[in-house]
Image: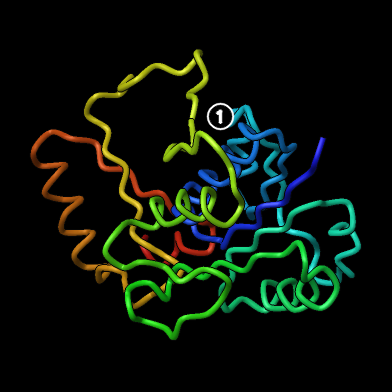
Amino acid sequence: MKKALVYSSKGLGDGLIFLVISNNLNKNGYKVDTFHPFLSELDNWFKYTEIKPYPKSESNFEFLNEYDLIIINSDYNELNKLLVNHAKSNHLEKTYELHPSACKGRNLPKGDLKFNSDITVKENLAIFCENDLNLTNVFFSNDITIPTHLKHRKFKKRIALHPTSKNIDRNWPKEKFLKLARKLKKAGYEPSFILAPHEKDYFG
């Protein structure tokens, strides 16, 4: 069985979207490893791939040798840049660099796929699977499967607020989120902030 690597950028949304590629590769006969810094915590939600954390920064990337296909969602993180450079220098014939952030005109186009800004990133990736990877029966889904022991809307009044992103320019100001939380609480809801440990002091 051929083996593929899908290396996603560190954003949660990036990871979930690039699982569309992992899903399609698996359905076309590949054993797939997906790399993401924290989605490995949801590994059992995606039956078709093993989700692994990023390699150590001092890695020599020898693990790339075991893959027949390498797909990298490139960004401006230093580890990501090192990985792209190594893969293209040593495994060019089996490496694809995909850079979706260029599709909205924010950055110059780069990589091996010209993203169409008139359709979603997910649709662009599905077309890439069909046209560039020559996969058949392409799906637009990452086939997320919620474990059966979890109950949908168990806490009906609880609302999760995720106030940060990797790009600080895209974040609402702190004061707006706190105002929203107070408004929700007054309306009888239970707002709950989802924060990384280093963000908790900032939001109090």
Residue 25: quarter of image = top right
In x, y percent, where is residue 59? 86, 67
Q: Is residue 171 left or right of residue 182?
A: right
Q: Is residue 195 left or right of residue 18?
A: left
Residue most toward the bottom?
108
Q: How is the image coloured?
A: rainbow
Judging depth in this view, the residue of 172 and 204 nearest the camera is: 172
Determine which residue is flagged by label 1: 45
Judging depth in this view, the residue of 80 and 201 nearest the camera is: 80
Q: Which image quadrant: the N terminus?
A: top right
User: Three-letter amino acid code at disc 1?
Assistant: Trp
In x, y percent, where is residue 201? 44, 64
Q: Which image quadrant: the C terminus?
A: bottom left
Measured along the vertical axis of the image, is residue 17 above or below residue 177? above
Label total for image: 1
Residue most toward the left?
187
In x, y percent, where is residue 42? 58, 36
Judging depth in this view, the residue of 132 and 42 nearest the camera is: 132
Measured along the vertical axis of the image, is residue 175 above or below residue 107? above
Q: Is residue 127 left or right of residue 51?
A: left
In x, y percent, where is residue 184? 14, 44
Residue 117: quarter of image = bottom left
Mark 1 element type: helix
Q: Residue drawn at (45%, 59%), measured in percent from left and top?
A: 200
Mark 1 packing: few (<14 Cα in 10 Å), some, or many (20+)?
some
Q: Residue drawn at (81%, 78%), measured in percent from left and top?
A: 89
Residue most toward the top?
149
Q: Residue drawn at (80%, 64%), measured in percent from left and top?
A: 56
Judging depth in this view, the residue of 8 and 193 nearest the camera is: 8
